[in-house]
Amino acid sequence: MRIALLGLGEAGSEIARDLVAAGADVRGYDPAVPHVHGVAARADEADAVRDAELVLSANSSHDALPALEHARPGLRPGTLWADLNTASPGTKAALVAATDVPVVDVALMAPVPGKGLRTPMLVSGDGAARYAEALGALGASVTVQPGPAGAAISRKLLRSVFYKGLAAAVVEALAGAEAAGCADWLAGDIAAELAGFDAATLDRLVDGTHRHARRRADEMAAAAEQLRELGVEPRTATAAHDLLAALRDGGPR
């Protein structure tokens, strides 16, 4: 299969090498990465896609549309355009509107380094089934999410609100604990709490946040004040306070 890969950074290069190892005929373009072993270097995006059956755009969210615009002169009818960028559902929809070729929204559901082509992929949009069949035959793990382009990335980004928000809260809390001299204690406490999470815990978190918004807003105001006293900027603590205050006051979340 002839595959063009636009973007040969950390993620793109690993996927490209795995595709080559699986027997795909891969050509690629990245102005910052002149060569990846086994990948035929092309002069630009349009040159990279001119003889491809499948295009994998693995740039960045702000490059998703420019990559398509630059490649458009070389795109042939029927070529499958797969966008692997963590762009918003609106951007994925804009890709569909910007071209006549089928667009597949690919959400990479785990970090690519170390997994490469075997990174779990959730895909949606026109051509999603075709993409799953083609990449699955090369060893990829692909799940089709019914719906238009944007449906797959929407699920990933909603999950990211939790995962990345949790990570940010942990980093901020541990920075405060380090300044307060109790980082080891807090790290152990966080680990124990996370180890006990289940569906019932989630229900208690959601219910308690709504029912006790007033008291918890006051608590987070005090937590943010303490972090400032310790020399730590309370970004996530302030965000938590603001959400709780909105619930307390009956305003929008």
Image: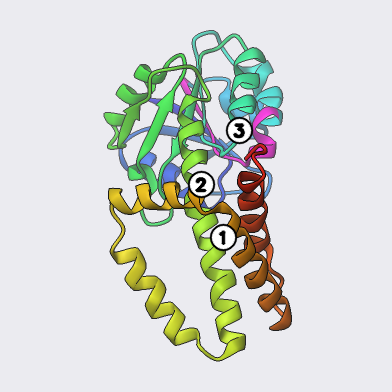
For residue 45, above or below residue 170: above
Q: Nearer the viewer, residue 66 or 153?
A: 153
Q: Give the number of the disc on residue 53.
A: none
Query: Which label's residue is closer to the chain start, 2 or 3?
Result: 3
Tag 3's secondary structure?
loop
Instruction: Give the amino acid type for the residue marked by disc 2 in the picture.
Output: His
Tag 1's secondary structure?
helix
* Neighbour tally class for label 3: few under 14, some 14-19, many 20 plus, Cα within 10 Å: some
Image coords of residue 78 (percent x, y):
49, 10
Q: Nearer the viewer, residue 101 or 166?
A: 166
Q: CA distance from mark 2 to mark 3?
A: 28 Å
Q: Which residues are magenta?
A: 53-65
Query: Which label's residue is closer to the chain start, 1 or 2?
Result: 2
Q: Nearer the viewer, residue 237 or 174?
A: 237
Contact between marks 3 and 1 (CB within 8 A): the answer is: no
* Neighbour tally class for label 1: few under 14, some 14-19, many 20 plus, Cα within 10 Å: some
Q: Quadrant of residue 165?
A: bottom right
Q: Give the number of the disc on residue 88.
A: 3
Tag 2's secondary structure?
helix
- Asked if residue 164 is among those painted magenta in the image, a careful observer would answer no
State the colouring used for the structure image.
rainbow
Q: Give the number of the disc on residue 216.
A: 1
Q: CA distance from mark 3 to mark 1?
A: 31 Å
The residue at which mark 2 appears reads as 210
